[in-house]
Image (spheres, helix red, strand yellow):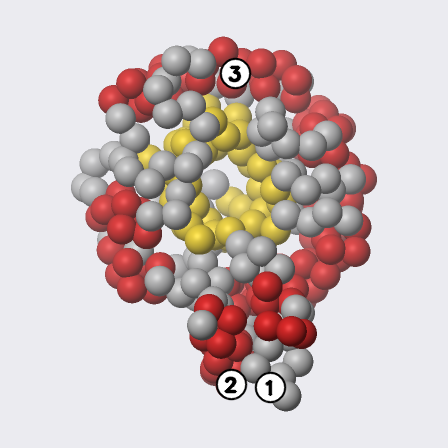
Amino acid sequence: MSASDFRERTTLGRTGLEVGRLGIGSGYGIPGAAVEKAYHEHGVNYLYWSLSRRGGMTEAIRTLGPKHRDDLVIVMQTYDHLGLFMERAHEKGLAKLGIDHADVLILGWFNRYPGRRVLDAALRLKEQGKVRFLAISGHSRKTHGKVAAMPSTPIDILMVRYNAAHTGAERDVFPCLPEIGRPGVTSYTATRWGQLLKQKKMPPGERPLTAAECYRFVLSNPNVDLCFTGPKTVKEMDDALLALDGGPMSPEEIQRVRRIGDHVHG
């Protein structure tokens, strides 16, 4: 692999979507202008929005959408575990963003396979052309592993917790991915909610990891298509984007990051 690999887009599993290696989450208040800059200058096109998130992403999608909609992968999320309000909330979100469909709908915080009513509501949105693909997120690696191995499921994308301190997906999820027709794999919490960046969490004599090192570690795993970043500021966005220039880690770098991750995990 060359250092340019992370600057190139990749195919998100069986969806066929072409995505940049970093995705941006809107949960921590990133300014819209920073999202637009990441798209124009770094090709970051996987943009995650939800009604409960803060306003910068809304601004960015409304600005980018008219000229670049076909290139953007707009991601919305539902936490409706009963399927009662999903369609109404989704349509409200589409109207707020000024778009007629989302590329991905995440079924959020599911530690078990979604029930029939939830899937039926999501599939109705898909049949109506208001969603293209379904994803599942949660903290149960075994559930993700089961979904990965299912020969027939409407869920095409896994959103998995994976970082240097939480490497369980290497045991419970990644080995379950089929060689042909595998779901897309996205990951979150690359910095373990900032713990991998703190000096006080490090082994004696070890400097903390940088944000770029955390993202590079995740993206160096060939099973991961895309890693989410949730920046609060322009600086945090810029720090994450440095991972794209750094490219895949060497075995020595990975060994060091794993050593730190094991220490932080305890």
Please name the residue shown 29% across and 18% down the image: 117
Please name the residue shown 26% across and 26% down the image: 115
The three-letter amino acid code for the residue at tag 2 is Glu
The residue singled out by tag 3 in the image is 89
Mark 2 or 3, nearer chain start: 3
**Residue situated in front as seen by the camera: 239 or 7:** 239
Residue 184 vertical placement versus 235 (above, below): above
Going by the picture, which residue comes out furthest to the bottom?
Answer: 205
Please name the residue shown 27% across and 51% down the image: 142
* Distance between the alpha carbons at the discs numbered 2 and 3: 47 Å
Counting from the top left corner in percent of width and height, residue 109 is at 42, 37
The three-letter amino acid code for the residue at tag 3 is Ala
Counting from the top left corner in percent of width and height, residue 60 is at 73, 33
Secondary element under disc 1, as helix, strand or loop, is loop
Residue 191 vertical placement versus 79 (above, below): below
**Residue situated in front as seen by the camera: 202 or 23:** 202
The residue singled out by tag 1 in the image is 204
Please name the residue shown 60% across and 28% down the image: 52
The residue singled out by tag 2 in the image is 252
Q: Residues within 10 Å of mark 1 (few under 14, many from 20)?
A: few
The three-letter amino acid code for the residue at tag 1 is Pro
